[in-house]
Image (tube, rainbow, N blue to C red):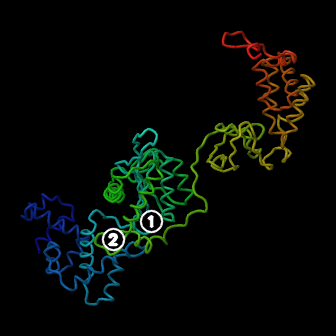
């Protein structure tokens, strides 16, 4: 025993295994065996050194060779429940030992208790070296092997990605098939996982996927802005797995290996024609997996989740996350900003005229930001060349005077011709706020320099006859040269061209 103490003392001082073997005259294989048992015990050198020779001898006997006494059997029967309790916040092995000693005064001491508990955990789940607290982390990744769906029309087999998420404490697993690993599909799958669990963990731990991390780094990875926005919506944190740190993602990689046998194997004989069909089949197999008892324990992932982890998750927000895209634009003099995707205009407060702003838009909303402050939010409207305006945003509501005013456009139009003046008046009258028409007025009156005032006058006269008042109408008239046609020429019926395949009116007599 004194030699073992000497070995452990040298090892704790940082000496190499080769040097320790030489100094203690112990073979390297025997040395490795002692050090392995020491590391499995989870004890420090000082704690081991305090043990008596008998306890120290017990510590270095192989678990399968150790005699199982009734006292040890009693202790081992308590380990599954203790392991579950250890996942609760604030619960430590010392606290568990104190509770154990209250119920079993003749039970093992603290060092032996920790030793047996560490050996039991190593046997039950040898890859689990991190103690996960309930509600703390959700680990996410994509499986290496894909599933597939079949195109009904062509019969083509299309591979699909498989997203896997697992809660650290309860190990409750979520699996979903998606078309790609792109951020749209990745974030939608993360959203599906949170709603499957019915709550939000303190942090989400992705591998260094491009859809999650723009730039990976050992110390300061740069998050994808959309994924960061997703985390902000659910009030959680993103903690990317550290590069070259396999333990950071061991749990989810272990889950992936398990779903190969428990989900992939069950789906191998089925044919699925849509993602919805495939995900329904996945969900059935997934529930069976989550209800299966954990190895060495008398409870399942689902039971452990309901008892330990569900109540520690933060509540979901009232609305689900909507994927947002972004673009930059400059606020026009009419107090609106153009969203080029839809060719629609949205108002912002007048003081931001001339400023460069960021638009964040989803399927239903458009938000406008300036220097990280949201200055406007509107329901998304996809009608092109129209305006969405909030009354309080308009310059006129604040007695704001700019270079663009109705009087300026009316005066400009009057200087060209009375019909142009009338047409501009019609445009201004048809808008709830005059500012909405400023851009149209500028575009129409600018045609005077491009094509000449005469053509503009005739185009306005023709548009007045149509009773249609917008920039697009004037543009179409000028582009097609309709302003150059006389009314008689425009109304003249077209002559039928001569062609051998055209029978003519005599054929039908």
Instruction: Give me the residue at 22% from left, 85% from top.
Output: 71
Q: Element type at marker 1?
A: loop
Quarter of the image where one finds residue 399: top right
Residue 317 sits above or below residue 472 on the image:
below
Q: 193 or 482, which lies in front? A: 482
Residue occupying the point 47% across, 70% down: 310
Foreground of the two, 165 or 43: 165
Look at the image and tell me in which quarter the C terminus lies. top right
- Residue 432, compared with residue 105, is above or below; it is above
Q: Nearer the viewer, residue 81 or 188?
A: 188
Among the two numbered marks 2 and 1 on one chain, the one whose residue lies closer to the N terminus:
1
Q: Return the residue at label 1.
A: 136
Please provide percent x and percent y for residue 359. Answer: 64, 44
Query: What is the number of the mark on residue 80?
Result: none
Q: Are marks 2 and 1 in contact (CB under 8 Å)?
A: no
Q: Which residue is mark 2?
A: 293
Q: Position of residue 357 (x, y in %)?
A: 66, 42
Q: In which quadrant will I find the N terminus?
A: bottom left
- Pointer 1: residues within 10 angstroms few (<14), some, or many (20+)? some
Location of residue 168 by image quarter: bottom left
Which tag is nearer the camera, tag 2 or tag 1? 2
The picture quadrant where one finds residue 347 is top right
Q: Is residue 498 left or right of residue 136?
A: right
Q: CA distance from mark 2 to mark 1?
A: 22 Å
Residue at figure coordinates x 34%, y 52% from the top left: 269
């Amino acid at each position: 025993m004194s030699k073992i103490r000497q070995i452990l003392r040298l090892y704790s001082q940082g000496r190499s295994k080769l040097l320790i073997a030489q100094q203690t005259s112990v073979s390297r294989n025997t040395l490795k065996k002692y050090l392995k048992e020491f590391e499995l015990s989870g004890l420090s050198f000082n704690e081991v050194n305090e043990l008596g020779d008998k306890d120290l001898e017990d510590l270095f006997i192989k678990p399968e060779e150790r005699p199982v006494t009734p006292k040890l059997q009693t202790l081992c029967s308590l380990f599954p429940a203790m392991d579950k309790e250890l996942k609760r916040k604030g619960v430590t092995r010392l606290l568990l030992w104190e509770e154990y000693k209250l119920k079993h005064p003749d039970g093992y001491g603290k060092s032996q208790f920790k030793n047996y508990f560490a050996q039991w955990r190593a046997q039950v789940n040898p890859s689990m070296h991190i103690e996960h607290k309930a509600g703390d982390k959700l680990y996410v990744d994509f499986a290496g092997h894909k599933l597939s769906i079949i195109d009904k029309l062509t019969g083509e087999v299309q591979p699909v990605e498989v997203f896997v998420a697992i809660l650290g404490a309860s190990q409750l697993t979520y699996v979903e098939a998606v078309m790609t690993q792109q951020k749209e599909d990745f974030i939608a799958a993360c959203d599906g996982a949170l709603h499957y669990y019915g709550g939000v963990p303190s942090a989400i731990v992705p591998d260094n996927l491009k859809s999650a991390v723009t730039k990976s780094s050992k110390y300061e990875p740069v998050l994808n802005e959309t994924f960061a926005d997703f985390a902000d919506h659910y009030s959680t944190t993103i903690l990317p797995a550290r590069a070259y740190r396999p333990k950071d993602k061991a749990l989810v990689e272990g889950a992936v290996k398990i779903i190969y046998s428990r989900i992939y194997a069950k789906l191998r004989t089925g044919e699925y024609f849509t993602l919805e069909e495939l995900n329904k089949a996945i969900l059935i197999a997934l529930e069976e997996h989550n209800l299966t008892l954990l190895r060495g324990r008398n409870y399942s992932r689902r039971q452990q989740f309901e008892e330990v982890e569900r109540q520690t998750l933060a509540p979901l927000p009232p609305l689900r996350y909507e994927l947002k895209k972004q673009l930059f634009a400059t606020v026009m003099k009419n107090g609106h900003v153009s969203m080029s995707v839809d060719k629609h205009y949205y108002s912002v407060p007048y003081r931001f005229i001339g400023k460069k702003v960021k638009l964040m838009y989803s399927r239903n909303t458009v938000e406008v930001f300036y220097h990280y402050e949201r200055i406007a939010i509107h329901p998304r409207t996809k009608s092109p060349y129209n305006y969405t305006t909030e009354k309080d945003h308009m310059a006129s509501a604040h007695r704001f005077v700019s270079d663009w005013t109705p009087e300026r456009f009316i005066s400009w139009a009057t200087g060209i011709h009375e019909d142009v003046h009338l047409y501009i008046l019609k445009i201004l009258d048809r808008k709830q706020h005059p500012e909405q028409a400023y851009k149209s007025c500028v575009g129409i009156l600018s045609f005077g320099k491009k094509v000449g005032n005469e053509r503009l006058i005739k185009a306005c006269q023709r548009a007045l006859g149509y009773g249609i008042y917008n920039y697009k109408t004037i543009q179409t008239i000028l582009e097609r040269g309709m302003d150059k046609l006389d009314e008689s020429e425009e109304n003249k019926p077209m002559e039928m061209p001569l062609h051998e395949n055209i029978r003519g009116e005599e054929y039908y007599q």
